[in-house]
Amino acid sequence: MSSQLGMMTLNKIFRQLLTILILSIAVLVMLFYAVSKNDRDLVVFSLIVMAVIVGILISVATRYHQHVKILQQLESMTTSIVNHQPAAPLFVEPSNPYKGLADQLNELQSRQQDESKSIENSNTELITILSSLPVGIMVIDSTHDVIFSNHKMATMLGKNVLTQVHPYTQDIRNYELLSLIDDVFDSHKSRQTEVRNVSDTSVTWDTSVLYNQLENDFHVLVIIYDISDLINVKQMQIDFLRNASHELKTPITAISGFTKTLLDGAMNDKKSLVEFLKIIDQQSEQLASLVQDVLTISHIQNGNNYDYKVLNLQAFIDSELTSYKSMAAGQHVTIKNNVDDGVRVTADSNMLTRILRNLVSNAIKYNRPGGEINIDYSANDSFWQLQVADTGIGIAQKDVSRLFERFYRADDSRTKQRVSGTGLGLSIVKELVDAVGGLIDVKSQRGVGSTFTIEFPIVTEDDDSTK
């Protein structure tokens, strides 16, 4: 309505200008006539009329210029709105026929700016969320250019991904992943699979390449998630079951074999009977020990409530070492408790007993005749240390990093000793230490000995007695 009114105003002004032009021509004709007739009164009258017409012409021309200027501003503002560009508001006088149209455009411009700001904020929030996700995300347009990639994707690819639009082949070097993306571009169908990537370390990605159809175009979304830990845990479970089955099979086979031999008549030979029963008893103890160690690990992993009490560490260690006097004497090994009298620590006695017994037992088994075992203590403001050092055969450096794996035995050093054990002792120690927030460290040298150092966090009186 305002636009129609504006056009009507322009047409009216144009008609006024045309009328003034005709009148001006008529006055000029009359002026020429007066001059030719030398009629002074008519000349003066003609000049007066001409002056009035010029004044009216200037007024009409000014109005025309103002209307044209407003129309140009309205056109410029409309173009800015169409192109989603900011534009200054247009203010006109209330009497101006373009007032309504200008107000409508101002309102439209304001709403568009609000919507643009809202969209911008939403995009910023979305990018922030995508950037903080623990998965790698990359968006590729139909021209094979990367239009978005979060920080996690750059970390997983081991490459700084440019923020500018660029081909995705600049970032991705994994052949399997490249082939997967190319296949989605060709088939226009989403794909999902596991992709292995080998750089400094080998990792496995759960990779989804999604085809996203838009109205007149499409995007390809690449999502990769590092499942290396899950794969490792799965493999550890498989290895644990395999090793546990193997360890269980040995004593069970021995017990079954010797029992059948006795039933087939060997029981009538008293010497064979006693010898076989000793073997069966030994294998039964080995089997029971293995089952107990497996249950212990399961119990630790399922959570445990520790009863922290103040212990006299020297007296506690002396009490535990009593059980190993005969074992140490049989191996001709001397055990020295170097902890000063009066040292007090706050710990769970059952947990500390398991740790100490496993370490001392191993130190005796893998020591040399005439060797020593030294147990020492140290502390600072944050933790206290328990150290068990032996002068035994030591551990090869290649085996130290795997020492706490379940059922792991160092081939070069341990198996030659032919000592009994479930292969779970040090695993239990590591599980217990981790469960109470401690650390364990091993230093060893072949032919010299091994030193196990455990750091326990100091528990103050303000802490809960049960954790």
Image: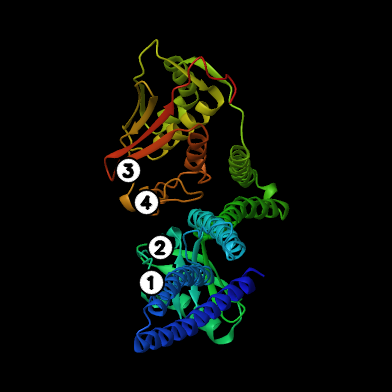
The location of residue 399, given as percent across then percent down, is 37, 51
Secondary structure found at label 1: loop
Position of residue 122 in the picture relative to residue 200 (left or right): right
Q: Quadrant of the C terminus?
A: top right
Q: If you read the primary sequence from the N terminus, does the residue marked by circle 2 or circle 4 appear first?
A: 2
Outermost top residue: 342
Q: If you read the primary sequence from the N terminus, does the residue marked by circle 4 or circle 1 appear first?
A: 1
Kindly identify which residue carries mark 2: 154
The location of residue 84, given as percent across then percent down, is 51, 67
What residue appears at the point 37 percent right and 88 percent down from the top-left corner?
Answer: 37
Q: Nearer the viewer, residue 341 or 390?
A: 341
Using the numbered discs, state the Cα–Cα distance from disc 3 to disc 2 in whole angstroms: 44 Å
In the depicted structure, whether residue 220 falls above or below residue 237? below
What amino acid type is highlighted by mark number 4?
Asp
Circle 1 residues within 10 Å: few <14, some 14–19, many ≥20: some
Outermost right residue: 263
Q: If you read the primary sequence from the N terminus, does the residue marked by circle 3 or circle 1 appear first?
A: 1
- Pointers 2 and 1 in contact (CB under 8 A)? yes
Q: Nearer the viewer, mark 3 or mark 4?
A: 4
Residue 399: which numbered mark, if any?
A: 4
Q: Nearer the viewer, mark 3 or mark 2?
A: 2
Circle 2 residues within 10 Å: few <14, some 14–19, many ≥20: some
What amino acid type is highlighted by mark number 1?
Asp
Using the numbered discs, state the Cα–Cα distance from disc 2 to disc 4 in whole angstroms: 35 Å
Kindly identify which residue carries mark 3: 394
Using the numbered discs, state the Cα–Cα distance from disc 3 to disc 4 in whole angstroms: 10 Å
What amino acid type is highlighted by mark number 2?
Ala
* Res 389 quadrant in image: top left
The location of residue 256, given as percent across then percent down, is 67, 53
Secondary structure found at label 3: loop
Q: Quadrant of the N terminus?
A: bottom right
